[in-house]
Image (tube, helix red, strand yellow):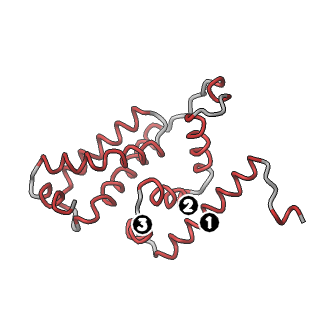
């Protein structure tokens, strides 16, 4: 991967295309967590690829390409959200009633993630969706590793509590 980044930085367009192909699925998953519409996801990805191509010479360390391009994507998603400020469209209630509906599960997950504050949600998404490790997230967010560990731990606890509340599970301390 580092060799591809170095080739792309030196102007090799084919190397850049290969890099983008390697990260295409990760970029799509990240963008789809931030944006509700496929058109917006496509726009954010396209803008990210164009920006990355233009700014690639500014990338200092090739090993951080993944972190760097994800940061560009997240910034583009946030800009698009601010620009559009769209309201969520109503979903077909019949589809929601189906128990094993993957769209329903995705909606539930997105709803639970959206209940987190921005710091917790970003840490969870970078760790579980983008696949960054704690050190990379810390560097990306310019935060100490301990802060990232705390955010991940607290976010998981909040998600667990919210999930249990929705399912009607009573906590241990409430049973006593």
Tell me the element at label 3.
loop
Tell me whether circle 2 and circle 1 mark residues in contact (CB < 8 Å). yes
Callout 2: helix, strand or loop?
helix
Q: Is residue 163 left or right of residue 8?
A: right
Q: Which residue is mark 1?
A: 154
Gap in angstroms between the C-alphas marked 2 and 3? 15 Å
Residue at (68% x, 28% y) in the render: 97
Marks 2/1: CA–CA distance: 8 Å
Disc 3 target residue: 133
Measured as percent of width and height from the top left, residue 95 is found at: 62, 26
Tell me: 84 left or right of 120: left
Residue occupying image coordinates x 62% and y 42%: 108
Position of the N terminus by quadrant: bottom left
Identify the image quadrant of residue 111: top right
State yes or no: discs 2 and 3 in contact (Cβ < 8 Å).
no
Q: Earlier in the sequence, mark 1 or mark 3?
A: 3
Task: Provide residue 14's location: percent of width, then percent of height.
Answer: 13, 46
Between disc 2 and disc 1, whose residue precedes? 2
Residue drawn at x 21%, y 67% is 60
Image depth: mark 1 or mark 3 in front: 3
**Residue that numbered label 2 is attached to:** 120
Q: Residue at x 42, y 45 (%)?
A: 29
What SS does tag 1 mark?
A: helix
What's the CA distance linking mark 1 and mark 3? 17 Å
Where is residue 99 shown, x and y percent of the image? 66, 33
Query: How packed is label 1: few (under 14 Cα within 10 Å), some, or many (20 or more)?
Result: some
Report the residue that reaches farthest toward the left. Answer: 11
Q: Nearer the viewer, residue 144 or 4?
A: 4
């Amino acid at each position: 991967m580092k060799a591809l980044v170095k080739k792309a930085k030196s102007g090799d367009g084919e190397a850049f295309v290969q890099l983008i192909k390697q990260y295409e699925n990760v970029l799509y998953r990240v963008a789809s967590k931030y944006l509700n519409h496929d058109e917006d996801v496509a726009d954010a990805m396209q803008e990210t690829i164009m920006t990355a191509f233009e700014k690639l010479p500014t990338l200092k360390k090739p090993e951080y390409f993944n972190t760097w391009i994800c940061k560009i994507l997240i910034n583009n998603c946030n800009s698009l959200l601010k620009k559009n400020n769209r309201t969520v469209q109503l979903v077909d209630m019949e589809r929601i009633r189906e128990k094993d509906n993957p769209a329903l599960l995705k909606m539930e997950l997105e709803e639970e993630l959206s209940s987190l504050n921005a710091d917790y949600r970003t840490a969870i998404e970078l760790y579980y969706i983008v696949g960054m490790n704690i050190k990379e997230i810390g560097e990306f967010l310019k935060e100490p590793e301990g802060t990232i560990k705390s955010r991940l731990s607290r976010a998981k606890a909040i998600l667990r509590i919210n999930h249990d509340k929705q399912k009607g599970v009573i906590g241990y301390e409430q049973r006593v």
